[in-house]
Image: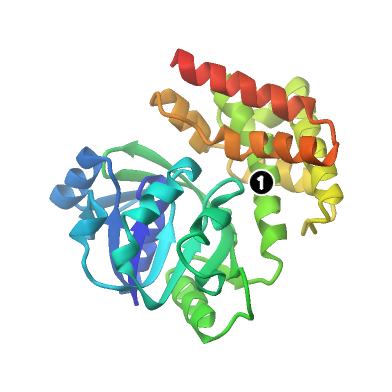
Amino acid sequence: MKISIIGSGAMGCLFGYYLVKAKAEVTLIDTWQEHIEAIDKNGLTIMDGEHIDHVHIKAFSEAYQQTEKMDLIIIFVKAYDTRNALEKSLHLIGEDTRIMTLQNGVGNIEVISEFVSKEKIIGGTTAHGAMLKEKGVVVHAGRGKTRIGRIEGENGKTEEAIRTLFNESKIDTDIEKNIDGLIWDKLLVNAGINGLTAILNIANGKLLEREETEILMKNLVMEAISVAEKAKIQISYPDPLHHVKAVAKATGNNRSSMLQDLNRGKKTEIEYINGAIARKGKELGIPTPYNDFLQQLVKAKEKLS
């Protein structure tokens, strides 16, 4: 299977590493030139506990440098870069190409559907955690289930082939039908963890060590649950708050992608996470003061970085 991973930061590299180990033909594409050059020169390094491994993998800083049609394109760019990334990658999309988004936040599927029919789009979530230690070096900071499924139409042989490849790659994967629910499952996790860890400059697990941070997490998540219920989105977990806490514990040493972004002086995805909850809440008449405040706080922090 020919696969391009567009957006090869920590998570893109992690997936690329495991897919290459399973003998898939993988190309990494990322605009961070120095990162790509480090991978070209030294290979991609993955640190998993005390285990360190290196793989050689094709990597480009511009999509046009890859010319073949792909069987699968996995989008891992930040949500605000989805449209630009796809515009530069249209030449990689053939008649049978599938586009998969495992990104944070909501709104990515709507952007992708501007370029390809929904039958070609696979949505999903992954509970893996990863951190970029330095250029070309990624820390695997947490493991979990990956769930994927077609946005429109029934899952078929193509989706089964992708699941089989992922499982052979040690990316534990299931096929699901309720994609909106899956995306909101992850949205609740990101809403309860990412912004708080970014502002407080702490690893995920630290949120569970103080009463104050647990209360803030609870209020953020409960607002999101109220919005989801009003929007008739079916959340997968009977106790979503418990699930968010379980994820924080399981990825306890991980520093969220939003925290990593702030520390590097980069724009965050806050508008597509807590901001998206606040906007949907306003549309539906559901108050979301905690999510709205956290969005403004992170955006202010971005401008101070």
Q: Percent x, y for residue 281?
A: 78, 38
**Residue 162 seen by the camera:** yes
- Residue denoted by label 1: 187
Q: Quick one: quadrant of the N terminus?
A: bottom left
Left or right, 77 with reference to 279: left
Q: Quick one: quadrant of the C terminus?
A: top left
**Residue 255 seen by the camera:** no
Q: Quadrant of residue 299?
A: top right
Q: Percent x, y for residue 43?
A: 20, 53
Counting other residues with Cα less than 10 Å from the Cα at mark 1, is it few (<14), some (14-19), or many (20 or more)?
many
Q: Percent x, y for residue 64?
A: 22, 58
Left or right, 33 with reference to 105: left
Left or right, 190 with reference to 138: right
Going by the numbered disc 1, the residue's amino acid type is Leu
User: Furthest-front residue in view?
Assistant: 114
Q: Nearer the viewer, residue 5 or 121?
A: 121
Q: Could you tell me which residue is drawn at 59 percent across and 45 percent down? A: 105
